[in-house]
Image: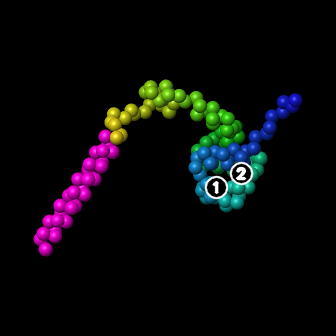
Amino acid sequence: MSTATKPKHIGRNISRIRELRGMKQEALAFAIGLSQQSVSNIEGSENVDDEKLNAIAEVLGVSAEAIKNYSDEGVINYFNTFNAEAFTNSHGAFGSYDQFTFNPIDKVVELYERLVQAEKDKVEYLEKLFKVK
């Protein structure tokens, strides 16, 4: 049994991070001043030169080291560490957050009632216009 580790495929890591960020190859290419085909070639490469890697990392909002060390398992484990408790205290996984002090359904009902009232006002206005003529 071999204990050799599989080398990291930097291009594939760039592709996965780009996809997780919801970015298309064209957008990344535009941001770093390359063609979409160049980005495709980079994502197909096992190694990427440091200058390009740093430019790509800056656009993706991560460090070059994060790209080099990216793993799908790490992302899955990161999100699996969140649980209901993290979001019920005042300092969840993303720091302090504001708790809502209103019921969203009440807001929907309030909005609906305002829309209905606006429609009634329009009808009343139109009826007045027709009576004048």
Viewer-closest of 20 and 108: 108
Amino acid type at circle 1 is Gln
Q: Which residue is mark 2?
A: 43
Viewer-closest of 21 and 38: 21
Q: Which residue is mark 1?
A: 25
As drawn, which residue projects farthest toward the bottom? Answer: 133
Note whether 121 is above or below 101 in the view shown: below
Which numbered dot is residue 113? none
Amino acid type at circle 2 is Glu
Q: Is residue 18 left or right of residue 42?
A: left
Give me the residue at 26% from left, 50% from top. 114
Categorize mark 1 by other alpha carbons within 10 Å: few (<14), some (14-19), many (20+). some
Note whether 131 is above or below 65 in the view shown: below
Q: Main secondary structure of the magenta part?
A: helix
Stretch in magenta: 106-133
Q: Does the magenta-highlighted stretch encompass residue 82?
A: no
Q: Position of residue 14 (x, y in %)?
A: 67, 47
Q: Quadrant of residue 89?
A: top left
Q: Position of residue 93 (x, y in %)?
A: 51, 30
Compute the Cα span from label 1 to label 2: 9 Å
Q: Position of residue 32 (x, y in %)?
A: 63, 55
Give me the residue at 34% from left, 40% from top. 105
Note whether 121 is above or below 3 in the view shown: below
Q: Say whether marks 1 and 2 touch (CB < 8 Å).
A: yes
